[in-house]
Image (cartoon, rainbow, N blue to C red):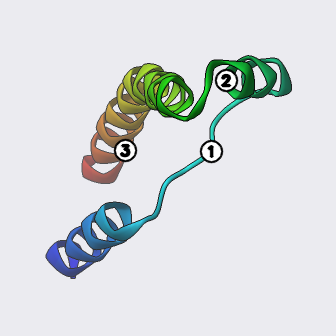
């Protein structure tokens, strides 16, 4: 069951399309820069978001695992 859920989650994440993760100010700046730099800015924003989300996910997993064993 756990392996199936992990496989499903991984599949969903890998098949997801491009995500627009910009505030309104970043969007206007990206529009002025052009298509190529706008994609780079969007990718940079997404990469910066992954680190805190990964840390939060790791801490949540550890918390869940320690409460499950108790």
Residue found farthest to the left:
3
At 67% from the left and 23% from the top, the residue drawn is 30
Residue 20: numbered disc = 1
Left or right of residue 25: residue 3? left
- Of labels 1 and 2, earlier in sequence is 1
Q: State the SS at label 3.
A: helix
Residue 67: numbered disc = 3
Nearest the eye: 69 or 28 = 28
Report, in whole angstroms, how far the alpha carbon at label 1 lies from the one at label 2.
12 Å
Quarter assignment of residue 26: top right
How crowded pointer 1 is (Cα within 10 Å; few <14, some 14-19, many 20+) is rated as few
Q: Position of residue 48 (x, y in %)?
A: 45, 19
State the residue position of label 2. Answer: 30
Nearest the eye: 33 or 64 = 33
Nearest the eye: 44 or 58 = 44
Q: Which quadrant of the figure contains the N terminus?
A: bottom left
Q: Nearer the viewer, mark 3 or mark 1?
A: 1
How crowded pointer 3 is (Cα within 10 Å; few <14, some 14-19, many 20+) is rated as few
Q: Position of residue 46 (x, y in %)?
A: 48, 31
Q: Nearer the viewer, mark 2 or mark 3?
A: 2
How crowded pointer 2 is (Cα within 10 Å; few <14, some 14-19, many 20+) is rated as some
Q: Is residue 11 above or below residue 45?
A: below
Quarter assignment of residue 15: bottom left
At 49% from the left and 54% from the top, the residue drawn is 18
Q: State the SS at label 2.
A: helix
Q: Position of residue 50 (x, y in %)?
A: 41, 30
At 28% from the left and 46% from the top, the residue drawn is 65
At 24% from the left and 49% from the top, the residue drawn is 69
């Amino acid at each position: 069951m756990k392996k199936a859920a992990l496989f499903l989650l991984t599949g969903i994440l890998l098949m997801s399309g491009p995500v627009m993760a910009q505030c309104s100010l970043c969007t206007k700046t990206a529009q002025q820069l052009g298509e190529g730099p706008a994609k780079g800015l969007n990718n940079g924003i997404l990469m910066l978001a992954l680190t805190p989300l990964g840390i939060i996910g790791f801490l949540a997993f550890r918390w869940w695992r320690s409460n499950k064993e108790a």
